Amino acid sequence: MVSRSEKHTDVVIVGFGWVGAIMARELTQAGLNVVALERGPRRDTWPQGAYPSSIDELTHNTRHALFLQPSQSTVTVRHRESDVAAPYRQLAAFLPGTGVGGAGLHWSGCHWRISPAELRLRSHYEERYGKDFIPQDMTIQDWGVSYEELEPHFAFAESVFGTSGQAYKVNGKIVGDGNPFDADRSTPFPLPAMKNTYSAELYSKAAAECGYHPFRIPSANASQAYTNPYGCQMGACTFCGFCSGYACYNYSKASPNVNIFPALERESRFELRAECDVLKVETDSSGKKATGVIYRTSKGEEVRQTADIVILASFAYNNPYLLLLSRIGQPYDPKTGEGTVGRNFVYQNESGVTLFFGQDKFTNPFIGAGGNGVAIDDFNADNFDHGPLGFVGGAPIWVNQAGSKPISSATVPKGTPQWGAHWKKAVKDNFQHTISIHAHGTNMAFRDCYLSLDPTYSDTAGRPLLRITFNWHDNDVKMIRYVTDRMADIGRAMKPESMSIETKEFGEEFDLRHYQTTHIAGGAIMGTSPKDSVVNRYLQHWEVPNLFVIGSSAFPQGIGYNPTGTVAALAYWSAKAIRERYLKSPGPMVQA
Amino acid sequence: MKRRLLPVLAGAICVLQSSGAYADNADLIKRGAYVAVLGDCEACHTAHDGKYLAGGLALQSPLGAIYSTNITPDRNTGIGTWSYDDFVRLMRRGIRKDGSSVYPAMPYPSYSKMTDEDLQALYAYLTQGVAPVSLKNRAPDIPWLLSARWPLAIWRLLFAPSPAPPLPSASYDETPDALVERGRYLVEGPGHCGSCHTPRNLVLAEKAQTATDGPKYLSGGFIVDNWVAPSLRSDDVGGLVGWTSEDIVAFLKTGRNRYGATFGAMNGVIAHSTSLTNDHDLAAIAAFLKTLGPPPGVSVETFRYDDAVSRQLFAGKMPSEGAKIYVDRCAACHRTDGRGYPGVFPPLAGNPVLQGPDATSAAHIILSGGRLPGVSAAPSSLVMGSYREVLDDQQIADLVTFLGQSWGNHGAAMTAPQVAKIRQATTDERRPAGD
């Protein structure tokens, strides 16, 4: 029961991570009053990132201090239509964010753009490899926005994040030893690339020997002290190794809390309400206009917040979840292929190789930064000929030494007993002498991978849980096995004593029990037609034009890179459209 | 002067043509709001989480806590019934409407130098531009007998005998001399910088009220809430000899510059006063401070960096226990070369806090941490965490001693009992300090 209503506002934003912060900043600058509602608590560098308690692995990594606890809210998961989904009761495979800053507070900091070809994936593959190349059940499609259109927004987001990197090409001119597969840039990176770790140096050398094109990963861990266009300051990264899962104590990792909130907080048109869990978006009787949202406070009170514009900016799958709960748009039906909400749910498809060196080679794995490292893009996007390979997609391959923590980094060679004296000895013998290489691969969209409301389980507010139906497909297994072979070649060129390879087997099912990545996408995808997408190219809802749904939920399929850079660029792109077009003439910006 | 005056006159004429006296008064209130910023009324008259200018902030004195008063226009608990003459009597002579004398925590000896024009504007602002708040003034926590106010009258007669004349002021002329004179007015008058930065005598009177009173003026050393107020003169014992006018302006405007960052009692001054002061006035303050020579017998040499310690630390050689703690706990931000990341994490090499005979501030900031105020020109409210629960007294003493002797610093050593005393005195403080 709604017990009270808050004063009407121009814009209400659901979720205060990167997207929420970007949209709040852009729209208050446009003169609008903005209320942001965040499900989790207030968080900041102090106290969540206060040294030394912030670099406590047991609290943060093992006990998940900063993540959304399943007891508050969770999802159910199943592999296929015929299964009954079970709740995700223990965080493992992915770690959804909550609280002020969202996952942006505890991400790593790999800050990528996107390959132009990936933005028009279906058209690109059909043009290059023919109409029959894409499997029947693979529902990949074009995003409806081009790299050229997003480029200024990628550039601005990098200036806000204080991104460290080496450009390859700026305004058509080669400027340095960056990634030769990168699209043209309008600006160099705001900060120079980070220093390489020893492991990344070895990898870079070996990859070049193998004929590939190593480059330093663009990182939102500041290589130097930095002040961004909002006046927000960052300290230089110390390679302490506590990025993913932690609030950076050093102001070195870009986060909404460090890079945007200090400026936004001073803005009188902005209000942030933490611990306000949005239950649904309300529409008027026509269903064509959002009137605001209903949220629940930490005291259990239900409150109505009306607004002229509603922006969903919550964690990846929560955007489509809110649409499903609010009955906005038609839920996707895998049998008929009709409906769009929940369609094209995707993940990330990874593999790894661990190299074990002798006792005389010290790799100092405790040094690291989340976005640091060296990658090759020779097998990412469509940078290589897929014709004879028979799969869609690819993966960057990198040594991204993020800093080994004492509990989780007990890496031992295959065949080591899993406990006891031999295990302890192996941990001791190997800790200082290992290097890991990873492939961070694409996951294509398939007809039978989607989101829907669970018929069995509900949460404390009585809402049905979100149900994920997801499994691996042969295309993706083929891709990751191919890329893993290339990765192993580079690994061998690094001359380890032994090597262990983790890859996928055909028929292998999605396993929730081990951490893979939190890069979840799709479910409220953008596109060129309301028949197969939820939002148009401006992230504006096709049927409810004053509703914007922004985040990785808009990715029509998985990308090779980490999603944050593209999410930020899409947010700035959408904000620009709202500022320059929508506000002048509220209504659909693309005619269906 | 003309340049600034013309638009004001033009504005005034428009106003007269449209709505007459009301708009004139609105302008007066607006100017008064700026005078309130210059005088930093908010620093003392607004309690933590309290209503604006409603008082109630505890100010520690050697006799016990005294509480700032409600200066909102509430008629029962504030100054709503005060006439302009009542107000001026307080500001110039330290005498309240009821005839009693105020504690010298109220810097009326400085405010007495304010111009009539500024006082009129301030009175208009306080009585018409501020929301009235009903909050009763709190009696001081000073034991009976000592709490009697009559000695304050004697104090007043002895140490603040000459309420007038106000300094010439509000010149916006940009000639160097005029800039210095405007700066003198701001610093000696409304800014009341001497309240903290001038040493006080045994009965807590500032040893110099103005620059012309001699080189004790703004020479630092007074301890406020366990922070040592540094010298603002051109000396090298924590003074400003190495700072350019631009450095001073950057510090006052943003709370940070290439040499250091604000902490402790200065945080509020930055947040509520200097960050809101216009650039011309900040330049004037800097120009005036740069005219103040060193106190007698104090060197004016600028800091000279010595890289001996950084070379040792870089080679993994720890010259002392303090050095080990430094590398372990401090060097990530302040770096082994002590140069920090200027503007973000303050350099410790050459830092004014680490020069001179009293390292209280250094120990205090290690114990309590610090939070930079976020201001419009520098919104990031950077925090140094508290090490109270991380380091014991001996470790802090070793660390402070190391800091005072490294990279060319010439600061004081510290002992564990000295740290224990500061720890005790700051136990109940908000952490990080300045939060």
Image: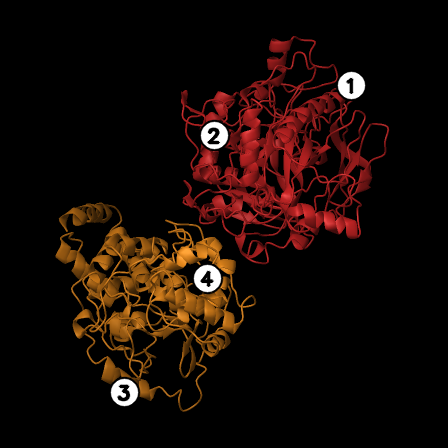
Mark sitting earlier along the chain (2/1): 2
Q: Is residue A566 visible?
A: no
Q: Is residue B167 above or below residue A284?
A: below
Q: Can you identify the residue that label 1 sits on? A: A336
Q: Nearer the viewer, mark 2 or mark 1?
A: 2
Alpha carbons under labels 2 and 3: distance apart:
68 Å
> Which residue is tagged 3?
B154
Please provide percent x and percent y for residue A68. Answer: 68, 46
10 Å neighbourhood of mark 1: few (<14), some, or many (≥20)? few
**Observer-nearest of A20 and A240:** A240
* Residue at the farthest front position: A360
Q: Which mark is residue B353?
A: none
Q: CA distance from mark 2 to mark 1?
A: 37 Å
Q: Residue placed at 45% from the left, 72% from the top?
A: B56
Residue A153's tag is 2
Q: Nearer the viewer, residue A244 or B313?
A: B313
**Amino acid type shown at disc 4:** Gly
Chain identity of mark 3: B
Q: Which residue is mark 4?
A: B370
Considering the numbered disc 4 on the image, is that residue within a helix, a strand or a loop? strand
Q: Which chain is red?
A: A
Measured in 3D between alpha carbons, the distance from the residue under mark 1 to the one under mark 3, in whole angstroms, is: 94 Å
